[in-house]
Image (spheres, grey):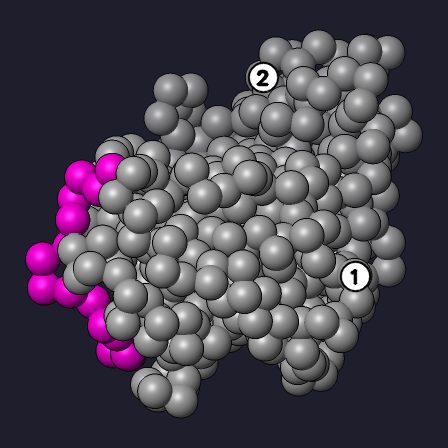
Amino acid sequence: MPDVSRVIAHYGELALKGKNRPWFMSTLVRNVKSALAGLGVESVRIVVGRIEIRHRSDADWGEIRARLARVPGIGNFARALFVEPDLDRIADVVVEAVRGRSAASFRIAARRADKRFPHASPDIERVIGRRVQEATGWPVDLSRPAFVIRVEVLTHEAFVSFDKEPGTGGLPVGTGGRVLCLLSGGIDSPVAAWRIIRRGCQASFVHFHSHPILSRTSQDKARELARILTASQLRSRLFLVPFGPVQQQVVVTVPPPLRVVVYRRLMIRIAERIAARAGARMLVTGEVIGQVASQTLDNMAVIDEAATLPVLRPLVGFDKEEITAEAQRLGTYDVSIVPDEDCCTLFTPRFPATRATLDEVRAAEAGLDVGALVERAAGDAAVEDFRFPMVQSPVARRAETAGDQP
């Protein structure tokens, strides 16, 4: 019997990278090796425009499948049977492999990667398709088959696969630079972080909390969300910023309608201080136009004026149903909807301004020692590092003692 303990992964967008493709591919291979640590993987290598993963035991397939599905850069993957590149032998292996299966219809999808193979792809499909039909009686359906048998012929071997698994797509993490994501604990911000991770960015996270004025629930949620996202980017850093003292100063100084906008401007300034420590070049938020008072175009423009780094908003044009559906697919939704008391609900005015002007916000901030508030909050941030696969508990320490991104 051919070796069944192999997986073939295909990439999509990386094929368009031209001269930079080897760097993208080597990064993806490194990420796959890290993601599959502890699962008996013997090798991960590039084979003629695809990635081959060899592992020792089919008992690990379920976990291998779950982890590969979350690695950005992989378009699809499947377990594969490898045989010598001989058409009769390939057909024998296919027929043997489909015995005992049932299908309403099927088709053969063949690809001849090495053009020196004497049979063109349509000929491979016809020969193997006829053998399968004779052995099973299944009807052929080239348009909407219930079962697809894939055959790829390389230079020294061929492989056969059946059940193609969808991957994440996107770009390998580590190819897009570093960003800092504001992680609220709600539904939107982890989805925004995920979308930017999928574009190859290594994300750190900052969560603003009001403990001990409020409970630790929002911090626990932020940790769990960071853990889920780390399964895709393999390592993460979470900054936990005590924001309650800042809000107390704002309450005694800033008129109620402007407090939410001032809170957000202060968060952006604090996040920038932390971004400098994390080596992040941009900030990422889960804001959506018109969703809450602080997310009108007028207010977002005033909030952005406090920033010196670009602020990315991957979800800015999405509606809540789209974001919720993606959170459910990602696995963050159930965590996000756990009731908590976050800093956004503390000292929030009943009627926040929806069209704050820059002049009135600057006038309101004039009574604050903005620099001191920002530096203290950033300096008091605790830091926790996460790795996947998790081999130890997150390591917590103060932000000013934190080294480079893990």
Q: Which of 401 and 206 is in front in this view?
A: 401
Left or right? Give the position of 18 relative to 194.
right
Q: Examine the image and state in which quarter residue 40 appears.
A: bottom right
Left or right? Give the position of 323 relative to 273.
left
Q: Dot 1, how many residues are within 10 Å of its Cα: few (below 14), some (14-19), or many (20+)?
A: few
Left or right? Give the position of 302 relative to 130.
left
Q: Which is more foreground, mark 1 or mark 2?
A: 1
Residue sticking out furthest to the right: 156
Q: Nearer the viewer, residue 70 or 154?
A: 70
Q: Which SS class for mark 1? A: loop
Q: In the image, is residue 362 part of the stretch drawn in magenta?
A: no
Residue 164 appears in the figure: no
The residue at the point 68 percent across, 27 percent down is 14
The residue at the point 35 percent across, 46 percent down is 362
Please tell me whether the stretch drawn in magenta is mainly helix, strand or loop: loop
Q: Which percent across, then down, holds residue 406? A: 76, 64
The magenta region covers: 339-357
Q: Residue 404 carries which label?
A: 1
The residue at the point 72 percent across, 20 percent down is 17
Residue 278 appears in the figure: yes
- Per the image, the residue denoted by label 2 is 126
Left or right? Give the position of 281 relative to 330.
right
Q: Which percent across, then down, holds residue 390? A: 67, 75
Q: In the rendered image of this protein, does residue 25 appear above or below residue 236?
A: above
Q: Earlier in the sequence, mark 1 or mark 2?
A: 2
Q: Nearer the viewer, residue 40 or 235?
A: 235
Q: In the rendered image of this protein, does residue 296 appear above or below residue 236?
A: above
Q: Dot 2, how many residues are within 10 Å of its Cα: few (below 14), some (14-19), or many (20+)?
A: some
Label 2 sits on what residue type?
Arg
Q: Which SS class for mark 2? A: helix
